[in-house]
Image (spheres, rainbow, N blue to C red):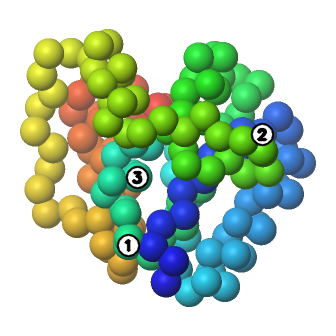
Amino acid sequence: MTGLVHQALRYRSEDEFLYATPEFVSDGLDAGDAVLAVVAVPNLALNVAFAGSGHWILCPYDTRTLPEAVVHGVARAHPELVHERGSAYTDPAVFSTECDAHRPDRLPAGPDGSPFSRGRSATVRPALTAYARRLGLPEQRT
């Protein structure tokens, strides 16, 4: 078990996505870890919630359709970028402070009983999706 591997894949074509994804999945499974592909979730929370849990998490981002600010933020929220050199990774506490300047005063409490642990990965996505929907996030964004 490796602890946590959390990478962003910024891709510009379907071929680029299809080239990188199987390699990531294979490497994670070969390490004996659980592998997740996660889209549009709070990535800073993943760094904390899954720390030391034996997961490999890949977050794909289609740079053809995302605003430049989001593409830049992706690099700051992920410790590693697939097939890219260098890192703009920012400590989660620092990045969260910056993001907090743009959030509502208070968010509703999230659901309890959805632990982030090996063997329970499948329960996390529905819990986060339900929470996001209660906050008014459109279905296509969950």
Secondary structure of the residue carrying numbered label 1 = loop
Residue placed farthest to the right in the image? Answer: 15
Precedes in sequence: disc 3 or disc 2: 2
120 shown above or below 116: below
Q: Quadrant of the C terminus?
A: top left
Q: Please report the residue visible at 67 percent of the width from the left and 70 percent of the height from the top.
A: 25
Q: Give the numbered dot on residue 47.
A: 3
Density class for disc 2 (Cα within 10 Å; few <14, some 14-19, many ≥20) is some
Q: Position of residue 82 (x, y in %)?
A: 73, 51
Q: Is residue 103 left or right of residue 113?
A: right
Residue carrying label 1: 53
Precedes in sequence: disc 2 or disc 1: 2
Amino acid carrying mark 1 in the image: Ser
- Tell me which corner region of the image, top left, top right, bottom left or bottom right, holds residue 107: top left
Q: Please report the residue visible at 65 percent of the width from the left and 40 percent of the height from the top.
A: 87
Residue carrying label 2: 11
Secondary structure of the residue carrying numbered label 3 = helix
Q: Position of residue 61 (x, y in %)?
A: 65, 38
Q: Is residue 41 visible?
A: no
Density class for disc 1 (Cα within 10 Å; few <14, some 14-19, many ≥20) is some
123 shown above or below 108: below
